[in-house]
Structures are given as C-alpha cells and as structure tokens.
Amino acid sequence: MRHVNNTGRPAEDDRGPIIEAQAVLFEIAGLGWDDPILESFGDSGKIPLYASKFSECAVVPPFKYSYGGRLRQFLGVDQLNWVADVLRAKPYTKSGWISLTAPGESPDAVPCLTSLAFRLRDGRLAMTAAFRSQNVFTSYLNYVPLRSIQSEVAGDLGVGCGSMRVFVDVPHFYAADAATVGEILRLSERDGLGEGTSVRGPARGFGRDRGRLRPNGARRAS
C-alpha cells in the first residue's frame, strides 16, 4: 500500500478510478491471519469468501473464476499434484511452474493470479506467485490462502515452507479506498509495522477469525 500511495498515478478501471504504481517484486518470509496489522485492519467478513476462491473448484459468486479449479482440475489436470510429482522426481528442477491462464479465454475472466512457481532449496519449498494486477488494499485476502497452497505442496513433499516471493505487474488501489489506505499507513507507521503489537483500526466493525486458513493448515484452538 505504501508503494502505491507514495509513487502511484491516477488511472482507470472497470470498477472506477484507481491509483496504480510500477511493478513490484517482494518476498514474504512468513505470514498468517494473526499478523498484527491484519488483526487490526483485516476484513474478517471476506475471509470465508476468498478462502472458497482458493479451495472450491466451482466458481463462487461474485468471482468470475476459481483459483481452486485452476489449481486442481485445470484442463483436466490437478496441477498441485503434478508439480509435487515433478519436484519429487527432480528436487533440483526449475520447471515446477504452473499456469492459471488459458489461451483465448474471455478477457473479463482472466485471473489476476497468472502463475505459480515452486522450487526446493535448502530442504524447503519456496514459491513465487505472479499477478498481472493486484488491489493492494485487499491483497492479503489472496496472500494468506496462497501460503496455504504452498504449505499443501510442501506437506505433500514432506518439507517445510520457505519464502513466498510475489511479483505484481500492476499494483493499485481504488480511489474510493484512498482515505482508508492513508489512515492504515499512518497508524501502522505510528505503532511500528510488524512489531507484534496490534493497533486499533478505523471503526468498521472488523471481526477476527484467525483460525481460518492458517499457513500450516491447522485451526487455532478455541
């Protein structure tokens, strides 16, 4: 959000004006719903919806595609099983790439997440996710489930998770969310990003459901 807020420029989108910035590549060492910033500002009401986008093979409204379907039965192939088999046969390979797009599909259904790459390095599974576009205001709703996908493949291979690298070609947020983005950045900077202390976010009725889609696939005990 800070990258787009500080360097972005006005642009257009089907759903209204946006602020978009240059492409960005970053690496996440670890993440989960219990991150202090997500606990303070995350919209727990959307967590089940985005979880189903990654776990269900059928398209779940209002989405126009299913990441679950494209990962597990795309053109008749379970791509997660396929990539695990590739890495099991050749642990050193750099060919563990899977695509979530198909030639000639409807332009309004091209997924934001276009590909995933998996590599075994130093006994752990690293993953790279490539997005053609990403709304940075809600990107966490994709990133934490993606960590669960990485954990799923790592578990199949009997290894732990390494880093998760993310490339976003067009990072942006909607102009309508600009004020909230600015407030989140102000408060998180005041209290220290990722220092383990939760700060109160804007009064938007955000609840908590940290047991859902934890990176290791486990639910937190009540």
Image (cartoon, rainbow, N blue to C red):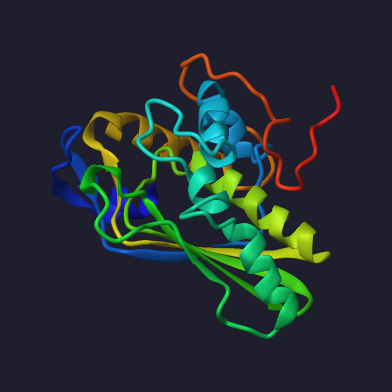
Is 26 rendered above or below residue 59? below
- Direction front: furthest residue: 76
Q: Which residue is drawn at 62% across and 58% down?
A: 80
Tally of marks: 0
- Direction right: furthest residue: 221
Q: Residue at x 54, y 44 (%)?
A: 68
Res 33 seen here: yes
Nearer to me, 151 or 165: 151
Return the x and y of residue 182 as percentages of the image width and height: 35, 37
Q: Which residue is drawn at 75% across and 71% down?
A: 124
Relative to 104, is 45 on the left or the right? right
Return the x and y of residue 142 as percentages of the image width and height: 50, 44
Residue 214 figure quarter = top right
Return the x and y of residue 212 as percentages of the image width and height: 68, 31
Q: Which residue is drawn at 75% across and 43% down?
A: 217
Is 52 rendered above or below residue 79? above
Nearer to me, 117 or 78: 78
Residue 25 figure quarter = bottom left
Return the x and y of residue 185 as percentages of the image width and height: 42, 41
Relative to 195, is 133 on the left or the right? left
Relative to 52, is 136 on the left or the right? left
Is 218 rendered above or below residue 165? above
Quadrant containing the C terminus in the rendered view: top right
Res 200 seen here: no
Nearer to me, 189 or 18: 18
